Amino acid sequence: MANVSVDGEKIDSYVISTGCSQGGTIILQGNETISSGNCSVVKGDSATYIMTPEDGYVLSDVLVDGVSVGAVPTYCFENVTEAHNIVAVFAKFDASAITVDSVDAQAHTGQNITPAITVRMGDTVLKENIDYGVVYSNNKNVGTAKAIIIGLGSYKGLEKTVNFAITASKGESYTIGGMKYQVTDAKKKEVMFVAPVFKKKTSVTVPKNVKIGSVTYKVTKIATKAFNGCSKLKKITVKSTYLTSVGSNAFKGIYKKAVIKVPASKLTKYKKLMKNKGQKKTVTIKK
């Protein structure tokens, strides 16, 4: 503790000593002429220090009384009642030392998805909109989205990319090629054929696979009442070889002499799956 004189009156004060490594400056706010060294702070007052890296350098750490407080650009000593020491540590900017944490798969919402991106330099977590910005692309539909990290400030010149998956959620419905589908298993990438959008079709194909976004899903089920009300439907071509179930009354109301064509290798199995699903006895199932 030292004494300073204000209008002839001695007031207690404390010394805050500063230091910094090569590559930047540490300045007492409000006294920009002091870039390092010691200054006296009146007891009970506060003192804020600003750490600024030079071009090609970044602030890697700040030590207060020998203890790291992280790479904070400012630090305030409040209500000073003892002496302190603050040291700013700078390091040369090395883009290869920057890492980006992986991003978990995101559930499809139909809106643009912008998950938080964590960027690190060693043990230091960088700050979005201060040290870097993020630009997203292909981040609305099911598939692989991209986040491009662009350096700001001391990290200017940094550019890294991280990909993340957007996956369809179980129960979510999609219309593809005039047909409705519902996701039944997001992990296994399986969907159910729900119904044709237009009931007046004369022929319909149940595909082997469908693409939702950039992801391919297997068609493994035909829904209950899938073709209900399709009175003009004379031909159903089933290309899927993955069918495991056909819902009740799936074919109720189709043309009485309709033909359901299935893969030759699945004829026996599919005849059992499709038996008594609401169709007239005059409807034939063949390869």
Image (tube, helix red, strand yellow):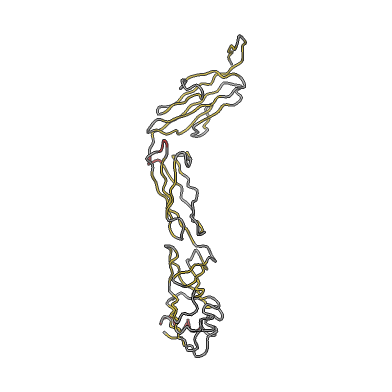
Screen quadrant of the C terminus: bottom left
Screen quadrant of the N terminus: top right
Residue 159 place in picture, x, y as percent: 38, 44
List the single residue furthest toward the top: 8
Q: Is residue 245 above or below residue 122?
A: below
Q: Give residue 84's quadrant in the image.
A: top right
- Residue at image location 46% in from the left, 20% down from the top: 33
Q: Give residue 264's quadrant in the image.
A: bottom left
- Residue at image location 52% in from the left, 82% down from the top: 251
Q: Is residue 157 above or below residue 37?
A: below
Residue 119 place in picture, x, y as percent: 45, 43
The number of callouts visible is 0
- Residue at image location 52% in from the left, 18% down from the top: 39
Q: Is residue 156 above or below residue 232?
A: above
| Residue 43 or residue 140, whichever sits in front | 140
Residue 278 place in picture, x, y as percent: 55, 84
Residue 242 place in picture, x, y as percent: 46, 74
| Residue 254 or residue 61, whichever sits in front | 254
